[in-house]
Amino acid sequence: MAEPMKYCETCGAKMVRYKHSLCKGIVNGLLRFAKFGPHPQRLCDKGKLAGGMTRNAADNFQKLKYFGIVVKAPPDGEAQHSGWWQITQRGWDFIRGTKAMPSFMWTYRGEVVDESTELVSIHEIKHDPYYLQWGDYVAESEGHP
């Protein structure tokens, strides 16, 4: 039986750790974004998504930061929340297939708190027809102590 949900006594927020996995949709979005090269790019510009990525991939793109694959990278004078991202060297190594990533990360309030010891390559994600298509990260989330 699952533990009852815990809430912060001060603000009432859920005290939940979320599990984030590198799934095909997120990786496909990353590959579309990578077509623009190594410079900072806007994920969505004037209502058009970068590289024709799906709305789902764009909505989940920020999860790549938990793996160190992308970072927010606004140009000078832009606000931090402006939607500009850049692929890191670690991200390019992952795309090239020379670096494997933890298969999942646990976060608590937007910060990484734990990671899988099992590593996964981009080739495994792209070529396994069953890799994480079943997963629902909310169902795999758990209360935070």
Image (cartoon, rainbow, N blue to C red):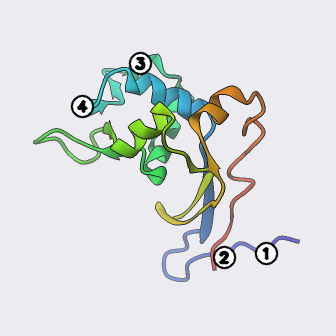
Q: Amino acid type of disc 4? A: His
Residue drawn at (55%, 34%) of the image: 26
Spatial CA span between label 1 and label 4: 45 Å
Q: Say if residue 25 shows up in the picture.
A: yes
Residue drawn at (50%, 28%) of the image: 29
Q: Amino acid type of disc 1? A: Glu
Quadrant assignment, res 72: top left
Can you tell which mark lies on residue 6? Answer: 2
Return the residue at label 4: 39
On screen, residue 145 versus residue 93, left or right, reads: right
Return the residue at label 1: 3
On screen, residue 121 versus residue 66, left or right, reads: right
Quadrant housing the N terminus? bottom right
Q: Which residue lies furthest to the bottom in this view?
A: 9
Can you tell which mark lies on residue 51? Answer: 3
Depth check: give the residue in front, 40 or 110: 40
Quadrant housing the C terminus? bottom right
Spatial CA span between label 2 and label 4: 42 Å
Task: Measuring from the top left, give residue 40's x and y in whole percent.
Answer: 25, 34
Question: For mark 2, does the 10 Å Cα neighbourhood hold few (<14), some (14 to 19), or many (20 or more) residues?
Answer: some
